[in-house]
Amino acid sequence: MAIATIYKICPADLWQAALAAGAFAGSPVDLTDGFIHFSPAAQVRETAARHFAGATDLVLVAFESESIGPGLRYEPSRGGDLFPHLYGTLDPKLALWSKPLPLGSGGHMFPRLDP
């Protein structure tokens, strides 16, 4: 896959704990599934709507896919679309940025995303 920006939606307190610890093992769903879920820009809004509907206190964290390492795999999910999954622990220092993902009346309000 080409270098791309990929995104992780995460509870803000969990992301803050990862920053403090220097490692992110994943959210509860990631731990259950055995990998850390990411979404590319074209899919992250649908991910928020499907899996985080009504959730507050979230952050959106951006990563350059190439920086994550060999544990990142693109695998089919949702209707055969490829989603990035990380098998392993994530170094939060690799984040390009993290921004609040507030909940508005029509769903989550996203910042500008890079493809």
Image (cartoon, grey):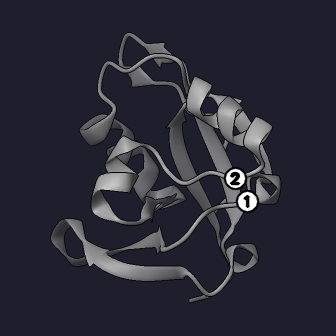
**CB under 8 Å between discs 2 and 1:** yes
Q: Which quadrant would the N terminus be assigned to in this image?
A: bottom right
Residue bearing mark 2: 23
The residue identified by callout 1 is 91
Q: Nearer the viewer, residue 43 or 21?
A: 21
Query: Closer to the camera, 26 or 55?
Result: 26
SS class of the residue under badge 1? loop
Note whether 41 is above or below 101 in the view shown: below
Q: Secondary structure at mark 2?
A: loop
Q: Quadrant of the C terminus?
A: bottom right
Is residue 107 placed above or below 63 in the rendered structure?
above
Q: Residue furthest top?
A: 105
Image point (45%, 70%), residue name: 85
Residue 108, by quadrant, is: top left
> x, y (%) of residue 83?
39, 70
Amino acid type at circle 2 is: Ala
Left or right side of 5 for 31: left
Q: Amino acid at mark 1?
A: Asp
- Say whether residue 59 is visible: yes
Single out the residue that lies furthest toward the left: 79
31 relative to 98 in the view: left or right = left
Camera sees residue 113: no
**Residue at screen point 48% across, 59% down:** 38
The one nearer the camera, 75 or 5, is 75
* Above-or-below relation of 59 to 50: above
Residue at 60% across, 39% down? 60
Q: In terms of image quadrants, where is residue 2?
A: bottom right
Q: Is residue 52 above or below residue 61?
A: above
Q: Where residue 38 is drawn, which disc sits there?
A: none
Of callouts 2 and 1, the N-terminal one: 2
**Image position, residue 97 (x, y; %):** 78, 45
Q: Could you say where residue 100 lies in the image, as x and y percent from the top left?
A: 64, 25
